[in-house]
Amino acid sequence: MKTTNWNRFFIICVLASVVAGVAGVQLIRIQNIEGAKQILADSEAYQGINRMIYPERGSIYDSDGRLLAGNEVIYEVGLDLQALEDGQRETVASVASSVLGLDYARILGYTQMTPGNGNPYFIVLDGFVSKDKIAQLESIKEDYANRSTKRGEVRPNLNGLVWTANNKRSYPEGTLASNILGFYSFLDRTDGIGYFGVEEAYDKLMAGEPKQVYSAIDPNLLTSIEEVPPGVTVQLTFNREIQAMTETKLDEAIEWSGAENGTIIVYDPETGEIVAMATTPRLDPNEYWNYSDLFPNPTPYNAAISSTYEPGSVFKVITMAAGLDSGAVKPETIFNDTGSLYVGGATIYNWNMGGWGEVDMTGCMQHSLNVCLAWVGMELGPDRFYTYMKSFGFDRNTGIDLGGESHWPLKLPGDGLWYEVDLATNSFGQGISVTPIQMVTAIGAIANDGKMMAPHVVKAMVIDGKQYNIDPVVVSTPVSADTAHTLTSMLVNSLENEASNALVEGYSLAGKTGTGEIATPLGYTNSTTNTSFVGWGPAEDPKFLVYVWLEKPEISIWGSEVAAPVFADLVKDLVVLMNIPPDNVRLADKLGENSFAISE
Amino acid sequence: MKKNLLQAYKQAPWRTQIQWIGIFLLVLVGVAVVAGVYLMVSGRAAATGRRIQSLEAEISALEMEINDLKTQYAEVSSAKSLSERANALNMTLLDPIEAMYIEVPGYVPPSQPVLAPPPAVEEISTPVLLPEFTASLWDWLRLEVFIEPSLPAESTESVTTEVAPAPTEVAP
């Protein structure tokens, strides 16, 4: 190559290198000036989206695996103002107003807004649109897309009208067991919380942990979206069929008796599981906004766990258990009932204001003698009596896993409000306030060899795809097994001797009626009462304990005439649903208790 | 011989130019091939990423639909609904006195339904592909050159008897 050519080649290379060098320097300079950093920072906003993902709320199932609370798909419909096209705003407003049932002028006003400069880019029209309405919108959208147009005619479209699917809490059984389930305020999509029942007690677990998730738009930064595990699913102890039957029986009982309200609890004394829990009134949790109308203050959401009342004679079961267990009395102990007992400046009378002469302890329970039980309480003495009361849990909540439980403080000797007569009246269930669940838990110990179980409604939880079963827990052993068996036998005999309305043909049942006078500002009144009945069976191996409380019945003031027949009516269906054969069949069984099948 | 070759190049300078052009083109083709491979790999990675995101969105939508269908099923088979259907068919609840109980040797009543496996049961996951097919070159090098040689002899033995864990990170 000639020298001239080399020189030319060299010069071109130098020039090209200088240009490239200048360009390179300029590139570096541009990337490091202040404005460039701002542009770089701004660009990150377009590289991805930070979203808060709320986990699917855990479901609730009954003991047979039937869904009681789940999630259904619901749609949020809104306007993406940037995507709206000129000439189509009226179309969008017209379709949205006709399908969603919203005001046309208001939607048209939204469509004519310019996004940015203080105006939103997206406007939510309706956050809870059903699938049917979305199907209508999709049909219209498809119809527009397929519509043939003439030359110059603009094809209508729904660009800018967008809908996205969301979960909404749903209770497929409606009002069934709503006092146990509680409700979730699903209208508040981001800050909804559970109220009452299981929804409140397990709110945090079922809600799961919301997570801030980054979703890249830049293809070079794409990563898998972080998984957000769903909330904890719970399986309850109660059976849907038994719950439905119990609620039906309660409603029928209220209508028949003219009671203001009522509560029935079906309980498994061996495990502490709630088999059914019916109260009135009941709310449809799908329409929880009716809560304040249905439950005017101070109506409790679930009277079974939060309504306190003076139970009356059903409480004699507890007093007699304490008397027998402490040795203060025996079943054959004779009490000479004169019809009254003077204690602490007050006179105690029987329900019929009469005396029954010499009666043993079974007779005292059979005839529900206040004077006799007050005497048993006096024989126990305040120290022992209230020690037993605390052992049975009347000084605290039972700890049942439902939101909203409460209790009335137990008056104890030494308290300013306790008087000597309280020992006598407390012995037959007056001057002491309890909740139905406290009564069920305490009397459950008599039906379970003296062991008091922790009442609970959750049988199992599903966490991260694994099922964790809840084991029964013994809270305390307030009385011995011997005492429990003795008292059960006494109550079986007293029911049979009395030919009680609570008896069910073919089944040995233990039980006790209760009629509690209601305290008013003017003193106790016996014109309106709280009637109740507690019973359990089969007596030799109890599988259920049923507690009935009817508040202020009109047809009668006596628990034996109001609550006892309701108990019997319920147990007749309960033994079928629980597959418990009559005594003669079950006791003759040589194959074991699970070898039966019901046939018509 | 050497003198003749230099003489030939001096008499035909285009040979030198062709040589330079050839080298330049070789470099250019090399750069183009590397850029092409990079573009293809990153394009495929981006497309796969988009597909994964799309599938994740689809999974999420399907899960919502499954829950919705479960709820719909629960509504049509609710206690109230079934009770109404039973009443329409003139069905009544059995009276316990009318019930006839039959001893059935070996009869096992239905057990409690299980919503999910218990925690004691570990799910055994068998990898469809061996790690050698899924690990990147960098992962393999890291395992073979940096991690495994540094393990004590006993540990190495135990590692070799087990299937190596799948890489948890995507190599750059």
Image: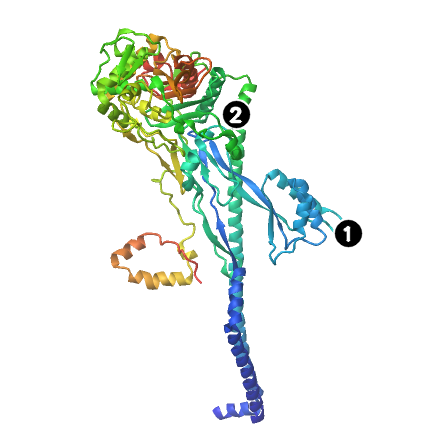
Q: Is residue A473 left or right of residue A166?
A: left
Decide: is A585 above or below A3: above
Callout 1: 10 Å neighbours few (<14), some, many (20+)? few
- In terms of depth relative to the viewer, which is nearer, A158 or A430? A430
For image coordinates 73% across by 47% down, the residue present is A147
Question: Considering the image in quadrants, where does the N terminus of chain A appear?
Answer: bottom right
Taking the image as drawn, is residue A226 in sight? no
**Disc 1 on helix, strand or loop?**
loop
What x and y, as percent, mark residue B71? 52, 35
Residue identified by numbered label 1: A153
Q: Residue lying farthest top?
A: A357
User: Residue at the spot x=26%, y=59% of the render?
Assistant: B152
The number of numbered discs placed on residues in the rendered structure image is: 2
Distance from label 2 to label 1 (Cα)? 54 Å
Q: Residue furthest right?
A: A151
**Which chain is home to disc 2?**
B
Look at the numbered discs 2 and 1 and tell me whether their residues touch, using CB distance below 8 Å.
no
Residue drawn 76% across and 49% down? A149
Callout 2 secondary element:
helix
Residue A381 visible (yes or no) = yes
Residue at far left of view? A327
The subunit carrying tag 1 is A
Position of A365 relative to A183 (above/below): above
| The label number, if any, that marks residue A182 in the structure image | none
Q: Is residue A390 above or below residue A499?
A: below
Badge 2: how crowded within 10 Å, few (<14), some, or many (20+)? some
The image quadrant that residue A427 belongs to is top left
Mark 2 lies on residue: B80
Q: Quadrant of residue A46?
A: bottom right
Colouring method of the image: rainbow
- Residue type at mark 2 is Lys
Query: Height in image: A558 above or below A214?
Result: above
